[in-house]
């Protein structure tokens, strides 16, 4: 049995097990693997569509006889990872993953922290773990093509308690200067600032707790979707070739590289952070329903994949986005 076949069988077994778990009850403002699986069955987030094609060369026999054939190129999003942001170790909203935390405790947390609350300085620990929602992608029985996810369900890719850089902004000075203009903000020249992307630590100067957690989640996505970063993590990147084009690095505010789906404290739809510049008329805080009393949040990180079904030994060319 080849490695790819073994991985496929393991994922199908995982998918069957996850599908059997749907409907498990849990406490308010927390989320379980079964909840994440159910939330991931969102056709709008999946956004499955044909976008082009591939030309293949197939040869067989002696002397060899070669023919060309085509297959359709598809693009769809995959919920690669669940990214969580919360105030202290052991308080992850994803209950089954609380044991993944390192030994480090929470740091500055503005809520109920006296003078620190007035400054708006908040601290979140964070994780990025392969989403159970990948099981839906693996279980899709389509007559077309489903792309192979780069992530493995329930596999850790980042845990801030194991990363010394998460608490040391002063050690990230050169990178911070180089990327000082990168931030999570409302679109437009006058869009409000949620938080800077660098330094990539758990500290955020933000009075709104949901926005602070979103900035932390964006920083984690920025780390794990790149190679050779000065952090302790596993890159969440696939290998291209053979009719597979996995996603590259996440770029803040760019829906062509990723989308976020809120999982806790409530389930939401897919979009990039700060996608809307103006709140609805009469709504003081449109993000108010997203604020968790516990200070703990979870999102599915969806990323776009492109692939063609293999129809030969060699891919001669491809077209379409």
Image: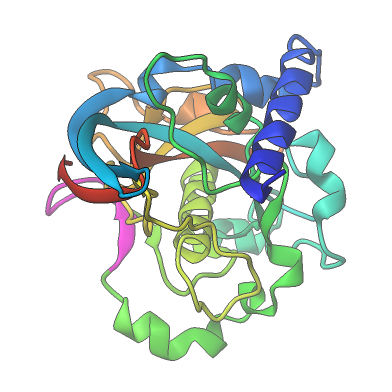
Query: Residue 199: percent from the left, percent from the top?
Result: 47, 74
For residue 105, side relative to residue 215 (left or right)? right
Query: From the viewer's perspective, is 85 left or right of 6?
Result: left
Name the residue: 58% across, 47% down: 151
Give the prevailing secondary structure in the magenta stretch: loop
Q: In the figure, residue 179 lies in which quadrant?
A: bottom left
Q: Position of residue 261 (x, y in %)?
A: 48, 31
- At 43% from the left edge and 35% from the top edge, which residue is drawn? 147
Q: Quadrant of the N terminus?
A: top right
Task: Give the magenta part as a residue range.
Answer: 182-193
- Give yes or no for residue 192 being in the magenta stretch: yes
User: Which image quadrant: the C terminus?
Assistant: top left
Q: Residue at x 45, y 88 (%)?
A: 173
Residue 301 falls inside the magenta stretch: no
Q: Nearer the viewer, residue 300 or 2?
A: 2
Q: Residue furthest front?
A: 63
Does any portion of residue 184 appear in the rendered image?
Answer: yes
Residue drawn where x is 51% and y is 77% of the image: 229
Location of residue 14 in the rendering, given as x and y in whole percent from the top left corner: 74, 29
Q: Is residue 263 above or below residue 38?
A: below
């Amino acid at each position: 049995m080849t490695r790819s076949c073994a991985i496929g069988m393991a994922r199908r077994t995982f998918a069957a097990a996850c599908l059997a778990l749907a409907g498990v009850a849990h406490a308010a403002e927390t989320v379980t693997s079964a909840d994440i699986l159910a939330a991931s069955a969102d056709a709008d987030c999946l956004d499955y569509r044909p976008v082009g094609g591939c030309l293949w060369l197939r040869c067989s026999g002696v002397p060899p006889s070669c023919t060309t054939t085509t297959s359709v190129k598809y693009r769809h999003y995959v919920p690669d990872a669940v990214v969580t942001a919360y105030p202290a170790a052991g308080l992850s909203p994803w209950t089954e993953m609380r044991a993944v935390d390192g030994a480090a405790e929470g740091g500055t947390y503005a809520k109920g922290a006296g003078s620190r609350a007035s400054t708006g300085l908040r601290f979140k620990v964070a994780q990025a773990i392969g989403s159970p929602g990948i099981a839906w992608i693996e279980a899709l029985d389509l007559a077309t093509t489903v792309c192979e996810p780069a992530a493995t369900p329930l596999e850790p890719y980042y845990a801030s308690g194991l990363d010394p850089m998460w608490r040391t902004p002063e050690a990230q000075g050169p990178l911070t200067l180089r990327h000082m203009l990168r931030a999570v903000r409302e679109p437009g020249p006058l869009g409000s600032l949620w938080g800077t992307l660098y330094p990539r630590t758990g500290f955020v100067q933000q009075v709104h707790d949901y926005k602070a957690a979103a900035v932390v989640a964006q920083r984690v996505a920025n780390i794990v979707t790149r190679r050779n970063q000065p952090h302790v993590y596993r890159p969440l990147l696939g290998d291209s070739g053979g009719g597979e084009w996995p996603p590259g690095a996440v770029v803040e505010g760019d829906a062509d590289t990723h989308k976020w789906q809120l999982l806790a404290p409530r389930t939401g739809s897919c979009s990039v952070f700060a996608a809307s510049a103006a709140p609805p008329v009469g709504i003081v805080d449109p993000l108010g329903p997203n604020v968790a009393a516990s200070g703990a949040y979870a999102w599915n990180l969806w990323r776009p994949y492109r692939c063609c079904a293999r129809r030969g030994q060699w891919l001669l060319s491809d077209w379409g986005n």
